[in-house]
Amino acid sequence: MSLTFTLIQTNLFWENKEANLEVLKEKILSIKEQTQIVVLPEMFSTGFSMQPTRFAETMQGNTVEWMRKIAAEKRIILTGSLMIEENGNYYNRLVWMLPNGKTWYYDKRHCFAYANEDKHYKAGNKKIITQANGWKINLQVCYDLRFPVWARQQKDDLFDAIIYVANWPQRRSYAWKSLLVARAIENQCYVIAVNRVGNDGHNIEHSGDSMVINPLGEILYQKQDDEDIFTITLDKKTLEETRSKFPFWKDADDFMLK
């Protein structure tokens, strides 16, 4: 059983929703290959902004509706994070939009205190494992990558892939690349990671380095610096053979998240 992902590594217009949505729509509609899941970066409509009072929307807002229309038109699952306001709180929310208009979502668990994200956004407290074509997929956002327990497999309920969406700076790209490989190896799963490129509103450079990694930690795709649209089909048989030949997951420690 296979699953096809398209990764969109793109520059983002700083705090300019209209420009970002226009360009991203063009990129998504330009995809010629048959694909099932299209992955956008973290805060794809604004960049990694600490201005949710100005730019956050509700789940009934224009950007979520934009995702709904494109997912329906292209018959894809469309995912990426954006600022969401709910019950007086702001979230860095990864939306998982199905082609039938139904949504799942994951609120970023680990807010990046170094950039004061914790002062503007409320941390999520629920781990989300979604499903597509018989695959179980763990949804994660950027800084979550530094906390392996949050992404760790439970040996009685294994998932098949982790998606990371990010605005991860170039100056810490070594950590980004190393930790992504580690997450794939320790969880014996695929990792699909989409990062932005270009400078943001604070003159912070992003090198992209979006990646696809197999359960052995081997890099199937990596792109540095340039914008790119890349489609790849992943085989669940390869995943199952890896886990059968190297059943390390059976020896994992039991644990409980609070």
Image (spheres, rainbow, N blue to C red):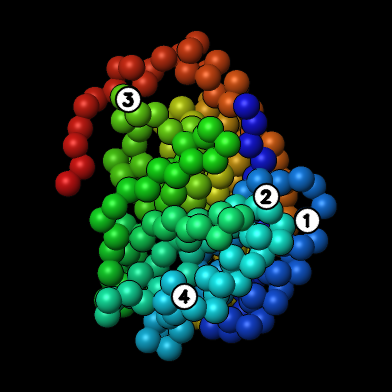
- Cα gap from disc 3 to disc 2, whole angstroms: 29 Å
Give percent across and percent down for residue 245: 50, 11
- Cα gap from disc 4 to disc 1, whole angstroms: 27 Å
Residue 221 against residue 60 in the figure, above or below? above
> Residue beneath label 2, please?
6
Under circle 4, the secondary element is loop
Q: Three-letter amino acid code at disc 1? A: Ile
> Residue beneath label 3, please?
155
- Cα gap from disc 2 to disc 1, whole angstroms: 8 Å
Label 2 Cα neighbours within 10 Å, binned few <14 / some 14-19 / many ≥20: many
Side of 75 where 90 appears, left or right:
left
Nearer-N-terminus badge (3/4)? 4
**Figure quadrant of the N terminus:** top right
* Dot in front, 2 or 4: 4
Give percent across and percent down for residue 18: 63, 83
Under circle 2, the secondary element is strand
Nearer-N-terminus badge (2/4)? 2
Residue 30 against residue 241 in the figure, above or below? below
> Residue beneath label 4, please?
60
Nearer-N-terminus badge (4/1)? 1
Under circle 1, the secondary element is loop
Q: Three-letter amino acid code at disc 2? A: Thr
Residue placed farthest to the bottom in the image? 54
> Residue beneath label 1, please?
31
